[in-house]
Image (cartoon, rainbow, N blue to C red):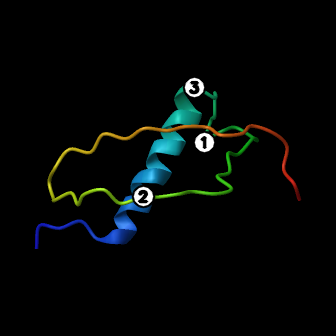
Amino acid sequence: LGHVNNVVYYEYFDTFVNRFLIEKGGLDIEKGEVIGVVVETFCQFHESITFPEVVDGGLRVAKLGKSRY
């Protein structure tokens, strides 16, 4: 149909965060003992994208710290 389903946007977010943690945070997803957790996400829709359009993503960290649990 050419459109990108809503759930796919959050799959993109997950990919952006994991890439950031691997490249900038030293996360080793195969052998490391440390994991990365995204506590909260926010999405503000501006315009739809279509398949197979290239997607550029950005990541902003609002707070780094220990878990509240």
Residue type indicated by callout 1: Ile
Q: Is residue 48 above or below residue 21?
A: below
Label 1 sits on a secondary structure element that is loop
Could you tell me which residue is drawn at 57 percent across and 57 percent down? 41
Q: Where residue 65 sits: x, y (%)?
A: 81, 39
Could you tell me which residue is drawn at 64 percent across and 52 percent down? 38
Identify residue for label 1. 29
**Mark pair 1, 3: CA separation:** 13 Å
Name the residue at the left extreme. 1
Mark 1 touches mark 3? (CB < 8 Å): no
- Marker disc for residue 55: none
Identify residue for label 2. 44
Where is residue 36, by image quadrant?
top right
> Which comes sooner in the sequence, label 1 or label 3?
3
Could you tell me which residue is drawn at 60 percent across and 41 percent down? 30
Label 2 sits on a secondary structure element that is loop
- Marker disc for residue 24: 3
